[in-house]
Amino acid sequence: MYDYVIVGGGSAGCVLAARLSEDPDVKVCLIEAGPADTAENIHIPVTFGKLFRTRFDWDYATHDEPFLDRRRVYLPRGRVLGGTSSINTMIYIRGNRADFDDWRQPGWGFDELLPYFRRSEDNERGESGYHGVGGPLTVSDGRSDNPMTTAFVEAALQAGGVANDDFNGPAQDGFGRFQLTQRDGMRCSASVAFLHPALGRPNLTVETNTQVHRVLVEHGRAVGVTGYRLDEEVTVRAEREVILAAGAYNSPQLLLLSGIGPAAQLTALGVPVVLDQPQVGRNLQDHLLIPLIFTHAQPVSLLIAGEPQHVRRFMEERRGPLTSNGPEAGGFVRTEAGLPAPDVEFLAAPIMFADSGLGTPTGHSLSYGPSMLTPLSRGHVTLASDDPTAKPKILHNYFAEPGDMRSAVTALRLGLDISRRPALAPYTTDPYRPPASESDADLRAYVRQYAHSIYHPAGTCAIGSVVDADLRVLGVDALRVVDASVMPTLVRGNPNAPVIAIAEKAADLIKGTAPLPPAASVLSG
């Protein structure tokens, strides 16, 4: 018996396990379906792509996407302590003030969340009104310094962009290098930052290689979970709460398997209905990337990372190409005048990143493109079977709304314009699988053929429809959801930092401690 049982050892789960176990009188159990995060490829930044489709990846894919030529899109998710923060590109982006304010949920505006961003952060640039020091999560400038990264930023400025050296400061618009969740040139996942320092606590139990199959609900109250540790059936009881932190695909799947979801769908699959809740699994959102790839003859791409001099530099200085996170630089732009905030994030990587990241680089290349931040289209997560080991059925429904395609074509044109600027001339000599032309029809065809997820799902257990403002599941006692699925709308940027902030706030809500002072007082102080 534990006080709190947390399902999912990803970004949110690691934060919750660390924060809740700070109280020595509270017993916490963190359950992760995958293994511990001991593999070397997790911690050396540039090798993250080698983790795709391994035992550290849930290896999901969408169902046939009707507006992407019925392609199935690869959806990697971390299945390891640290979750996707153990296999992602380590970009530290909070999103835009407008994202949180537009949720219009009590306690979740930007001013109320900024103190939690600052509490978790240890930014190597030092403390300011927007940044914290001394927190568990190390935030650093990149150490790869690839010349293509510099050239991309210069080309974006030549195309009319503005420079921005802090996307998490007063303004998000502009181009520059990303700050990263790295510590001394190594990955600083949520597991490294939050969980590892807490592992010696006697009141914290971490169960790995244990896949939860459903939440146990008795008389309207969550009392524990049941699943399998390898081939052994296990049940873990919770005295106070069960907390789902399994992500935007697996948290709704677990609710559905537990009988919490659309009654007709559950009945059809033979799942006993505990609560008819039609919004579970709905409202699915994601950021779609439109890749542009250029090959060239300059021997400066990440293909050189394994050369002896770079290995030696990494071992001695923790610098050089082995510290690269992939998309080292980028920027935020608006496809229309009058938009309240950017709707596109450019991501630029000094490597051939083809076929959703599953392609093998065949030569020195530069890859970049727009990630569409504010999709109007919505998808859903449903059960494919009542067997808990079956993968969920995921349909993102990308480009179901015509406005999403219009914005994508505009953003793609911006990307092609950047490619023609003088700064990128040495690196864009040979377009790899380019659009047939720059007509609207050919650009739309290119988007449908090559656009892929950039792995930012959210929204499937949203505040206001599935959970309340305290993240408690509506209609079931002692059950919460804490992960990207609670976002009513997806943030403008990489969601790992926002998920950590959400979990920081959730820990305070669960413990009943006073919330941190709002950002207005932080910034004025």
Image: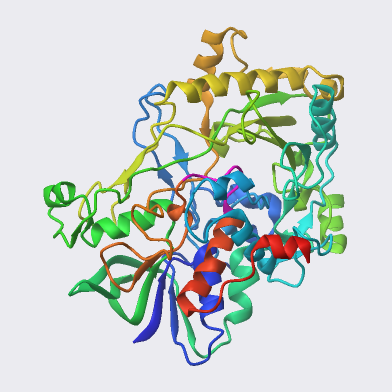
Nearest the viewer among 337 and 344 is: 337
Answer whether residue 121 is visible to the viewer in this image: yes
Considering the image in quadrants, where does the N terminus appear? bottom left
Q: Magenta span has 127?
A: no
229 relative position to 102: left or right: left
User: Residue 54: x, y in percent?
Assistant: 49, 53
- Tell me the residue at 36%/59% (across/down): 467
The picture places residue 318, in percent across and down from the top left corner, at 82, 60
Magenta region, main secondary structure: loop
> Where is residue 108 drawn, in percent x and y?
53, 58
User: Could you tell whether 454 is left or right of 368 in the image?
Assistant: left
Question: Is 491 one of the magenta-colored residues?
Answer: yes
Quarter occupied by the C terminus: bottom right
Query: Viewer-proximal residue, 370 or 232?
Result: 370
Number of marks in picture = 0
Q: Quadrant of residue 38?
A: bottom right
Which of the two residues, 421 or 208, is positioned nearer the viewer here? Answer: 421
Taking 426 as reference, is 203 left or right? left
Residue 233 horizontal side relative to residue 7, left or right: left
For residue 12, above or below residue 496: below
Colour scheme shown: rainbow
Q: Report the magenta residues as a range.
A: 489-496
Residue 505, relative to residue 326: is it above or below?
Answer: below
Q: Can residue 299 be seen from the camera position used here?
A: no
Image position, residue 59 (x, y; %): 44, 48
Q: Residue at x 40, y 33 (%)?
A: 72
Snapshot quadrant of residue 196? bottom right
> In the image, what residue occupies the spot 78% across and 58% down?
140
